[in-house]
Image: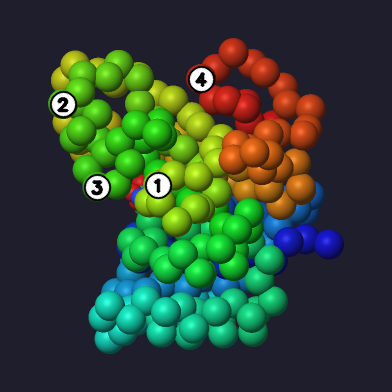
Amino acid sequence: MKRRVAILISGRGSNMAALIAAARAQDFPAEIVVVISNKADAGGLAKASADGIPAVTIESAPFGKDRAGFETTLQAVLDENRIDLICLGGFMRLFTADFVQRWHGRMLNIHPSLLPSFPGLDPHGRALRAGVKISGATVHFVTPETDAGPIVMQGAVPVHDADTPETLAARVLEIEHRIYPEALRLVAAGAAVIDGGVCRIAAQIARDGRLISPAPT
Ligand code: GAR
């Protein structure tokens, strides 16, 4: 049985598109059932519809600081669609601890840095100012702390002296599109298990020496 996945977005949805493309493979252990945006003008909504995936908007702005109210509406859509797993793809709204707890071990996020370095806003600018020579992206289970939680997969890229936040973001985004589908594959297959606050991979993984760990299959 394929795991039923909802992707939550707020913007252009390029990670969403990578997940949708990967899930088309017959042997992929998850199917993308619905895309949900908290913004009506998210570019990803049209992309999802063009790919034949139902796209739903739940505007979060009218809820203001009422996070729980927004989440009640969101949970209803997740229930209607019998969702097993949530993937956040540039979803720029914080959840209550209650919602995170309800989805513990079943909600993934991608962040464009090698966590725990540079969580939160402007990760690329901060990476450049810190002078790091390698940056990358992290797929992790969501915990109440922003951009934290057990790490499922990371991918690394070099940082060049001439980089701007934009050029680094573009290089990191390519690696995001590679690792997010692979991380979802592991989680949906039950091969990524949270153990004492860290994620262990219970699968035979080919290790090819590239700076993607664990390596994509
Ligand atoms: C991605 O770079 C993702 O890693 C980042 O937002 C972008 C969304 O792009 N997420 C975060 O910064 C989460 N803290 P996309 O809409 O094209 O997938």
The label nearer to you, 4 versus 3, is 3
Asked if the residue under mark 3 is in contact with the one under mark 4, i.e. CB atoms within 8 Å, the reply is no
Residue under label 1, please give it: 147
Residue under label 2, please give it: 129
Residue located 36% across and 64% down the image: 94
Q: Position of residue 14 (x, y in %)?
A: 42, 53
Q: Is mark 3 within 8 Å of ligand 1?
A: yes
Q: Quadrant of residue 46?
A: bottom left
Disc 4 crowd rating (10 Å Cα; few below 14, some 14-19, many 20+) is some
The label nearer to you, 2 versus 1, is 1
- Residue sitting nearer the eye, 112 or 44: 112
127 w.r.t. 78: above or below: above
Q: Position of residue 205 (x, y in %)?
A: 73, 26
Q: Earlier in the sequence, mark 2 or mark 1?
A: 2
Q: What's the residue type where badge 3 is placed?
A: Leu
Left or right of 53 on screen, residue 207: right
Disc 2 crowd rating (10 Å Cα; few below 14, some 14-19, many 20+) is few
Left or right of 204 on screen, residue 50: left
Q: Which numbered marker is on residue 121?
A: 3
Q: Which numbered marker is on residue 211?
A: 4
Tell me how far mark 3 sits from mark 1, CA to CA.
Answer: 10 Å
Q: What's the residue type where badge 4 is placed?
A: Leu
SS assignment at label 1: loop
SS assignment at label 3: loop
Q: Position of residue 190 (x, y in %)?
A: 76, 47
Tell me how far mark 2 sits from mark 3, CA to CA.
Answer: 14 Å
